[in-house]
Amino acid sequence: MSASWILVQQEVSDTTRVCAYDRAGMGWSQSGPEPRDAKQITSELHTLLSESGIEGPYVVVGHSFGGLYTQTYAARYPEEVEGVALVEPSHPEQFSHRPQAHDSYEPQKFAVSSLLARLGIVRLLYKLSPAPPS
């Protein structure tokens, strides 16, 4: 979630504008329309940036699964992207290279996390343990 990157965002904001968001269904964000695939998610980000009046070009940053969406965004909107930064990104073929890893992948963890976010449990946990004020 974007709030967990607050210290990095503050540091980077000394030299450039920083915008962070939680994609639909994550963090503070409401659920979004199905399907929740890279095309839908990157279209939503594109709309968000356009309607917010935040002008590019952008350096887009993605962590974990967000790395896949970041790469998709850069491929779909190359004229808007100046650079891409990937932080421990997922790999598009991570399960096809190691089939045994697919067996250990537990999609129900994402379903539980999504449910907890929708119920406000995630917000409550962040209120109990907020980012440091500094």
Image (cartoon, rainbow, N blue to C red):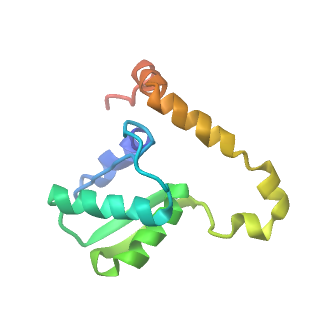
Most distant residue in the top direction: 128
Q: Is residue 73 left or right of residue 87?
A: left
Q: Is residue 115 visible?
A: yes
Please name the residue shown 39% across and 31% down the image.
131
In the rendered view of the protein, which quadrant contains the C terminus? top left
Counting from the top left corner in percent of width and height, residue 65 is at 55, 56
Q: Is residue 86 visible?
A: no
Displayed quadrant of residue 3: top left
Q: Which sits in the foreground, 113 or 70?
A: 113
Counting from the top left corner in percent of width and height, residue 43 is at 35, 64
Please name the residue shown 60% across and 34% down the image.
112
Counting from the top left corner in percent of width and height, residue 104 is at 79, 49
28 up-or-down from 21: above or below = above
Q: Is residue 37 left or right of residue 73?
A: right
Counting from the top left corner in percent of width and height, residue 128 is at 44, 18
Please name the residue shown 79% across and 57% down the image.
101
89 up-or-down from 29: above or below = below
